[in-house]
Each structure stands twice: as structure tokens, then as C-alpha cells.
């Protein structure tokens, strides 16, 4: 079968990938820099071809609760937003985590705090990886560094979400959401039949009475001992995810004396910085976390072995650096370099930061 190659934005790519995955429903609300997801879905009109529901809700809160309802029936449903919009969705996301419901959430990050700026940022790392809502829960968090990964992570996010019955998030910065690249689109998957959903999701509610048991989906437990059981079940699931699902990429780490660690689009900038540094005779490697949760602790620990220092580069004031330091237990120096307000560092700036913060110390 001939590959379908197209030139499109990251946001547009997510919309195409969702339709091709067999997504049953998208519920969203416009916000820059991710509005093209909803716009593309509306222009493609998948309700006429695949039966996918596409709805612009009246607010972010309404959108996430529509996702909650769709997920409770075992349907593959999703939403997308950008940083302040994701903040509004946090209550619903926490409810879904407590109810053990699969769903896919796209966050195309912009600068904050508050309304901030519409320019790119990576400052939602804590919000995504530490559980931005209330309670002890985690989301599976995937960090794409290309438009192709925006496509690929739709299927991966949905598959992992259904495997572990927990919401998954694609955490993309505004650069990846807005930039255009060639992508290879996946083939269409058929949407699941009602019988297939019943077999895959026996926990899902059917809303039926009579001889068929009616499942009740809720995150509410008034009895403390039962709520503790729910939490223990969630923690057991998270331990299995941490064991089985960490993902990362390494480039030129075997002979490196210094290590750059970055995610998303900033990892691409660091890849160029690595080339510049090596041209100057500085042996630098790059490690890119692909899953931000579960964080690839073992990969970072092994990648750090024998290195003289690590520079964590992020489009924020310093968030992932905390997980890096926990992973390596302060065995070598770890410093941070980041830009704020939507200003994107150049590869040369990254090299200069490496020299000043790590090499010259």
C-alpha cells in the first residue's frame, strides 16, 4: 500500500490521526495555539464518513465532562486545549482518573502563568506529570518532538489509555503544534462495533436495566475504606506503567562527556547544539524523554554514567530538572537553562549555557 505523505501543521496532523484511528468523539473549545485541531475536524466532517462525533462545547469545563461521559461508555474519545484551558479541565481529568476511564487529551502549551502569552512554552510539565488536579493520580504523558510524532502518539496514547484504563495526554509545545512538516499518515482503522466495545470494556456503562447488569461509573466513594481500596488499585496500576512504559531517545551518548536533556521541540534545538559543540571539540550527547510520565528514570541514570555534567534545557524556569536530579541522586552536576515568555533559545545559546554553567565550573 502506497504511503500517504502530506504537509501539515502538528495540530492538523492530530485531527487526521484521530479520524484514522477510529476515534468515536472529539469535544473541544477554541484556544490559541491549538484551535486548528477543532477547525480541521470540522472541515473534514468525519461524521459523514466514519461516524465520529465532533462538537464545539460551550466551555472547556463542558468539553472535558462530555469526554467523561463518552469514555464511561467505552468509546474512544478525546479533547484538546492549551495551557489555561487545560487548567479549567483539571477537575474533570481528576474525576476520570478516579473512575479509571481511558481518554486522550492534547495540550499544546503556551506561556503562563495566567493568560500569559500565545507564544510557545513547556511550563505545563508539572501540571501534566504531577497530576494537575486533586488527588493521588497520574496521566500517561507523551512529548512529541515532530509533527510525525503528533500523528503517531494519537494511536499510542489511545492504546496505552485503554490498556491501563487511565487518561493519556499528548504534551506538545506550541512550536510542534504550529510548525509544518511532512508526515506519513496511518491507514484507517475501523471503528469498533458495540459488541467489540463490550468485550474490550466490560466495565463500561450500558445504561440498560433488566437481565444485563448496569455498570455505574463514578469517582465517588463515601466509605473511607473503599476509597482507600480505589487508591491502592490506582497505585498498583501506576507501578505497572512505570515498570513497562518509559520511553526515551539517545543520540551520541556512548562517547559523550557532557549530556543535554530536553523534550519536545527543544530537543531538536539541542540536537543542533550538540553538533555545534562537537565541532568545537566538546563531546556532547543528547537524551530526549519521550514519556514525561512515566519519566525514564533508569534511562537517565544510565545515560548519566561517566558524564562530567548535565544541562537540562527547557522552555520554562526549571521543571523537568527536578526529575533528572531525583533519577541520578546528585551523582554529577545538573544545571538548567531555559527561556521564558515564549522566547525560543538558539542552538548557539544552548552551547554557551553548557560552557558557562557546566564546563567552566
Image (cartoon, grey):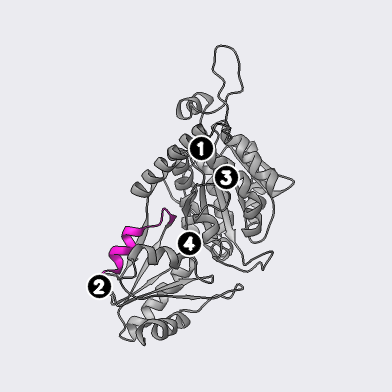
Q: CA distance from mark 3 to mark 2?
A: 40 Å
State the extent of the magenta-drawn residues as a range.
Answer: 292-306
Above or below, 157 relative to 348: above
Q: Position of residue 58 (x, y in %)?
A: 75, 46
Q: Which residue is mark 2?
A: 306
Above or below, 320 relative to 203: below
Q: For the residues carrying marks 3 and 2, which lies nearer the camera in this image?
A: 3
In the current view of this chain or complex, which residue is farthest to the front?
224
Quadrant the N terminus occupies: top left
In the current view of this chain or complex, which residue is farthest to the right?
58
In percent of the image, x 59 and y 12: which residue is there? 210
Q: Position of residue 173 (x, y in %)?
A: 55, 63
Q: Secondary structure at mark 1?
A: loop
**Residue 281 is one of the magenta-drawn residues:** no
Q: CA distance from mark 1 to mark 3?
A: 10 Å
Foreground pick, 14 / 93: 93
Q: Which residue is mark 3?
A: 94
Q: Which residue is mark 1?
A: 100
Q: CA distance from mark 1 to mark 2?
A: 41 Å
Q: Are marks 1 and 3 in contact (CB under 8 Å)?
A: no
Q: For the residues carrying marks 3 and 4, which lies nearer the camera in this image?
A: 3
Q: Position of residue 183 (x, y in %)?
A: 48, 57
Sequence-first disc among 3 and 2 = 3
Q: Are marks 1 and 4 in contact (CB under 8 Å)?
A: no
Q: How many neighbours does mark 3 have within 10 angstroms: few (below 14), some (14-19), or many (20 or more)?
A: many
Sequence-first disc among 2 and 4 = 4
Sequence-first disc among 3 and 4 = 3
Amino acid at each position: 500500500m502506497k504511503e500517504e505523505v502530506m504537509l501539515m501543521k502538528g495540530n492538523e496532523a492530530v485531527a487526521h490521526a484521530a479520524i484514522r484511528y477510529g476515534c468515536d468523539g472529539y469535544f473541544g473549545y477554541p484556544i490559541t495555539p491549538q484551535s486548528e485541531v477543532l477547525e480541521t475536524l470540522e472541515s473534514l466532517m468525519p461524521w459523514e464518513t466514519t461516524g465520529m462525533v465532533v462538537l464545539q462545547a460551550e466551555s472547556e469545563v463542558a468539553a472535558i465532562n462530555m469526554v467523561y461521559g463518552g469514555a464511561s461508555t467505552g468509546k474512544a474519545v478525546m479533547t484538546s486545549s492549551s495551557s489555561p484551558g487545560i487548567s479549567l479541565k483539571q477537575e474533570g481529568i481528576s474525576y476520570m482518573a478516579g473512575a479509571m476511564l481511558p481518554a486522550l487529551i492534547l495540550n499544546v502549551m503556551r506561556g503562563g502563568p495566567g493568560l500569559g502569552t500565545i507564544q510557545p512554552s513547556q511550563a505545563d510539565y508539572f501540571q501534566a506529570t504531577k497530576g494537575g488536579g486533586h488527588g493521588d493520580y497520574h496521566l500517561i504523558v507523551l512529548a512529541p518532538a515532530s509533527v510525525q510524532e503528533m500523528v503517531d502518539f494519537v494511536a499510542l496514547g489511545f492504546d496505552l489509555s485503554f490498556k491501563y484504563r487511565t487518561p493519556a495526554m499528548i504534551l506538545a509545545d506550541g512550536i510542534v503544534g504550529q510548525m509544518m512538516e511532512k508526515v506519513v499518515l496511518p491507514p484507517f482503522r475501523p471503528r469498533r462495533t458495540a459488541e467489540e466495545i463490550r468485550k474490550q470494556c466490560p466495565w463500561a456503562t450500558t445504561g440498560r436495566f433488566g437481565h444485563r447488569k448496569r455498570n455505574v461509573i463514578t469517582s465517588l466513594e463515601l466509605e473511607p475504606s473503599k476509597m482507600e481500596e480505589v487508591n491502592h488499585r490506582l497505585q498498583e496500576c501506576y507501578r505497572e506503567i512505570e515498570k513497562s512504559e518509559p520511553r526515551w531517545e539517545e543520540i551520541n551518548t556512548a562517547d559523550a562527556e557532557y549530556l543535554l536533556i530536553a523534550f519536545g521541540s527543544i530537543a531538536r534545538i539541542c540536537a543542533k547544539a550538540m553538533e555545534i559543540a562537537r565541532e568545537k571539540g566538546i563531546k556532547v550527547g543528547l537524551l530526549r524523554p519521550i514519556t514525561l510520565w512515566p519519566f525514564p528514570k533508569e534511562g537517565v541514570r544510565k545515560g548519566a554514567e561517566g558524564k562530567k555534567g548535565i544541562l537540562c534545557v527547557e522552555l520554562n524556569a526549571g521543571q523537568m530538572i527536578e526529575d533528572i536530579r531525583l533519577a541520578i541522586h546528585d551523582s554529577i552536576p545538573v544545571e538548567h537553562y531555559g527561556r521564558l515568555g515564549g522566547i525560543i533559545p538558539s542552538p548557539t545559546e544552548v552551547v554557551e549555557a553548557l560552557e558557562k554553567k557546566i564546563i567552566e565550573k
